[in-house]
Image: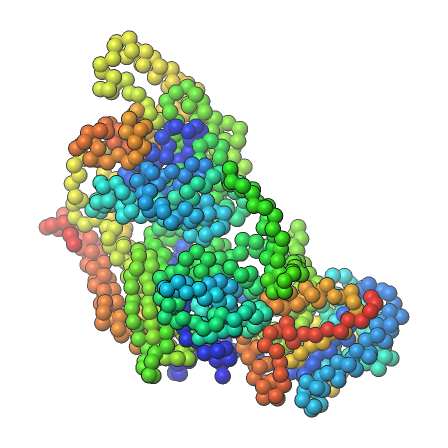
Amino acid sequence: MLVFAASDKGGTGRSVTSANLAYQRALTGDHVAYVDFDFGSPTAAAVFDVPGAMRGTEERGLHSYLEGEVTEPARIDVWRQTEHPLLRARPNQSGRLVLFPGDVGGGEFATDEDALERCVDLLLQLNGEFDLIVVDLSAGRSYAVDLVLAATAHPRMRYVPFRWLVFHRWTRQHVIAASGLVHKENGILKGGVDRGHDEETLQGAIRFVRAAVPDPESPLWLHGSPAQAAWMQACDEALRRLAAEHRIGDSVVLGIVPLEPILQWREQLITEEDVLSTQIANKETLEALEEIARRLTDDSHWGRP
Amino acid sequence: MTEAVFRETSAEPRTQAVPLSHLSLELGHFYMEDFEAGPAHLRQHFDRVRPWVEAARTVAVDQAGGKRPRISTCFLIDDYFARFSSPAELVPLLLAEADRAGLVIDYLARESGCAVTGKVPVAEAVAGRIVEEPPPGSYGIRPPAAQTGWLANGERSPTARAPQAMKRAAAWQPPTETAARRHSVFLDVELWSDGPDGRRTWSCPFLAAVWQLARLGLLRNRGEAVLSPHPHPHPHPDADSEFPEDWDELPTLVRLNPRADPFAAYRTCSVLPNRFLPVEHAVRVILDQVEVDPEALHQVAERSARESVAVPDSVADRVSYLFYAGT
Amino acid sequence: MGPEETAARAVLACGEVRTCLLPAGQALDSRAAAQLLRLRADERVLVSERPNLYGRSPDTLTGVDCPLPSSNGARVRAVGTVAARAALTEGRVLQTSAYFRVPATGPDHRRPWGHYLVRPGVVEPFGKLPREAVAQGLLDGGGLGELDVGLIAGGLLTRLLRHPLLDQRPPLRSRPTRLRWVALPTQHGDGPSIERFTVAEDELRTVRLRVPEGTRSAEIAGLCDDLALHDWLLTTVVHILDGIRLGPGTPRARPLPGPAEGRPTVVQALRPAVDHLLHLWMPRARVSRELAPLWTALEEQPGFTRQWQALVQRIRDQLTLHAIPPASREVEPSP
């Protein structure tokens, strides 16, 4: 199963959240690949805390692979090569977690027919090897989005299942932008149809993840004034209506990630340790991530709403 | 190999051998427009060819170690790119003009046969045997400049691809000939083009390279010889001509002279007008990069060694030309 | 005198084999296999049905001109061609194998390309070959820009995997493996031997061989294809057994939200191995008689077939156990 992580704007926590989803699935025993197609800003190595392993892979990442400079992209075994002390002790019964990094210093590039064929080669190879492949895509209407839309419409990929997660923050602008990325001109749906996708099927494979959502019910805000609580409630209501009007209402939401300082600032994987021992992360955040990770392959959350 | 008691025939390659002359001498390569120019053009051609034929024979005697060399002559008619008239009309004319110049054409070939003979896709097979000459620095990765349908004798200029964002585009670099001596004579040869209907048209130099391989006895299809000569068919008593009305009914390679030496030879020589110079340069670039059937190559090496005839290792070096002034 | 002997005598042979599961829902029959492996329009695909179904493509060549890797930093430029071919076993396991041999010395300048083309699979060094250093360098894998025979095997694999015959629906998850080998001549007329067989990384194995002088490199490649095939089978079946959870799982500090994720059952996980892999074990099926004894060493240590039989037995036991309805089991099946 391929999962594409997209967002219209930066700052949605798309990379760090999708990395957490990959990590959660590996914990449950799946073999997981995390593929960094954020061509303009390839930073997944930091999320998985593998900066040392990146040495020597500068010119062998996904940029070089797709441009034909190398025939096999560098891969980093996260359990083995991470510098994160907790991750290094690979939990028993967990699956493989392998990062495919971009070139260090790589930039956005125009993709051509050869890059598309190589992209299909790679995704097929990973599909034969991993249970779940999370592909993190550059924000906006990017070459990366274009490339995977074309790749998944390629005849060689006809039997490979894929799903899209569109990340957005819980603000007016982000809601409108996320809807635009999917539904508007040159968006994922129209672009996908142009490349040979069936609109209805493609739409059934797209779900939204609301990120950095302040939960008015959360203990975090318990000590606020009643006026503050009422205002938050009203804003939340208004945003829900806006989302529904823009066809990204609750029925197409796969999950909600609460506002979480550790995701915003540390931008790393949240472990059980962070919740139980050091208590720097909220239990709700971890549970939300676990739940979204589970729903990725739970068919009852997918299909035409 | 292991001596095995159990054998499966489909698992064991066999390669057919072909008889070989010392020299295959090509007396001309005519396009339909050459025939359209009329018998005078043919006459002029053979008049100019004749002295060079004598020279080629003298050299062949030397190379055969003083023995009587086996020499066969051939003539190639292009019926691939355009068609004109019929064999019934043109071939007798051709033979008469050759005879007039004192020349004998042993074998007559149609260029279409170099593309496909019977059911054998000859050109496609040769295309599949191209092994590109590696420019220095080739360590196993496919050269990024590889262009399907084209073959060069060196490295092309890097294509102007859009660089990654905020990276600088590479400056222009000249192409280089890999075997250059100080300065390059870079040549990029079009091997084929694909029409809008998906039909592939092989280029003239590519078919000419196939033609050279045929004359060197180095073409095989699954071990069987291809482009083998057919005896000249006995004409129907009622027919107006010895030759058919349709080019497709003429075998791709006909033995006109029943006493001719074998068609294929250790070496080839072609006597052609100057205008063939670029084509034959391209032929050399192609031949230089075709890996011929190793078993066929081995058979030639073994036979020539037995006869004490020196044959160059490199296939392209077995080919020679004599160019005369004119068109 | 075969075509191979016309070249200068080789003192070093090297190659790399890529082995992977054919990404197709059904194994290919012999006709489809021949179609897949038809790399050249004019050459036969070797198809054999005894003792198992096996197809092998004709050799293709790739030109190289680059330094050879060496363990002591010596820079030896070499020019020539690397041979590569593909093989399909039982329509199920696809292998590509690239190999070449190197003579002890070569000219100190590059010759016309035609010279190399009539010596298929030979890479000639400039000057004298520092054999030991290059052999070790090749096994260790070279730096960027040095001869990489694995790239050539990988390139051929990529080409084959794009074939329209393949529906890209592999019946089980598996990883491709690489086996890199070098062969040096034996001394004093000794028989062939395996000096070292190393499982270097997850996917990489290296083999160092001694073979009698004059052994054809295609035969050595054939032996190494066979080793790679069986090593891949072991690796793949071990991974399948690793991936199944037996008995109740380890309890987590916090229960997972929602219903327990539907992990594949033991039967679902093991079934593809039975359907697609267990019948493939057949060491030495196509190894030349001279090189076949090399298997004996591996059978003694680490005991390839012994391990395979243990794995097969374990799979059969598990399937038998799980065929019993849970109610009549006294305890949960565990390792």
* Figure colour scheme: rainbow
Q: Tell me: residue B150, above or below residue A138.
A: below
Can residue C280 be seen here? The reply is: no
Q: Tell me: residue A159, above or below residue B304.
A: above
Quarter of the figure that contains the N terminus of chain B: bottom left
Determine the residue positioned at 48% across, 51% down: A69
Left or right: C187 as drawn, with respect to A195: left
Q: Tell me: residue B40, above or below residue C168.
A: below
Residue B296: x, y in percent?
57, 77
Left or right: A214 as drawn, with respect to B161: left
Quarter of the figure that contains the C terminus of chain B: bottom right
- For the image, the number of numbered tags is 0
Determine the residue positioned at 33% across, 25% down: A212
Residue B49: x, y in percent?
81, 76
Determine the residue positioned at 69% across, 65% down: B281
Q: Residue furthest right?
A: B40
Residue B278: x, y in percent?
73, 63
Work out whether residue A251 or residue C125 is closer to the camera in this orientation and state it.
C125
Left or right: A74 as drawn, with respect to A117: left
Location of residue C113 (image quadrant): bottom right
Q: Residue furthest left?
A: C330
Location of residue B180 (image quadrant): bottom right
Can residue A24 be seen here? The reply is: yes
Q: Residue furthest bottom?
A: B67
Residue A52: x, y in percent?
32, 45
